[in-house]
Image (tube, rainbow, N blue to C red):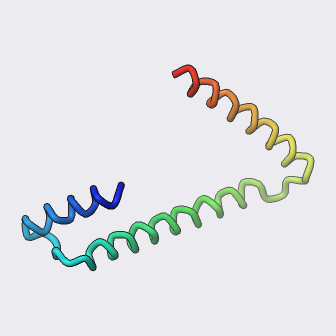
Amino acid sequence: MREEELRSRLQALAAAGRVTPEPVALGAVRRRGRRKVEARKAVWQRRWQEALEGLDDEELRVAARVLERVHGIFCEEQKKG
């Protein structure tokens, strides 16, 4: 969400008496959003590490080639669409 849109929504909520109209609210929203992103990132990093644990270099190279091909399929579809 762009800052202007967020600011507009916060102003509407402030007008309705649901949040404080102070600029501090925008900073608090950003901090909460950042914490959520960081928490989600940590979860996915742990999942990837667990999923790839025990694979040797050759297995990882093969997996990378497969993922590159799959990525290519999605890129082609995006160009068509």
Q: Residue at 63% of width from left, 30% of height from top?
A: 75
Q: Residue at 74% of width from left, 38% of height from top?
A: 67
Looking at the image, is 80 positioned above or below residue 72?
above
Towards the viewer: 21 or 72: 21
Q: Residue at 65% of width from left, 63% of height from top?
A: 46
The image quarter containing residue 77 is top right
Towards the viewer: 51 or 64: 64
Q: Position of residue 39 (x, y in %)?
A: 51, 68
Locate the N terminus and report the quarter of the image it occupies: bottom left
Looking at the image, is 70 positioned above or below residue 7?
above
Residue sticking out furthest to the top: 80
Residue sticking out furthest to the front: 4
In the figure, is residue 10 to the left or right of 70? Answer: left
Looking at the image, is 20 positioned above or below residue 15?
below
In the figure, is residue 55 to the left or right of 35? Answer: right
Q: Position of residue 40 (x, y in %)?
A: 52, 62
Q: Position of residue 53 (x, y in %)?
A: 79, 59
Q: Residue at 84% of width from left, 57% of height from top?
A: 54
Q: Exactly how many numbered labels are in the figure? A: 0
Residue sticking out furthest to the left: 16
The image quarter containing residue 44 is bottom right
Q: Position of residue 56 (x, y in %)?
A: 90, 53
In the figure, is residue 10 to the left or right of 62? Answer: left
Looking at the image, is 31 positioned above or below residue 3?
below
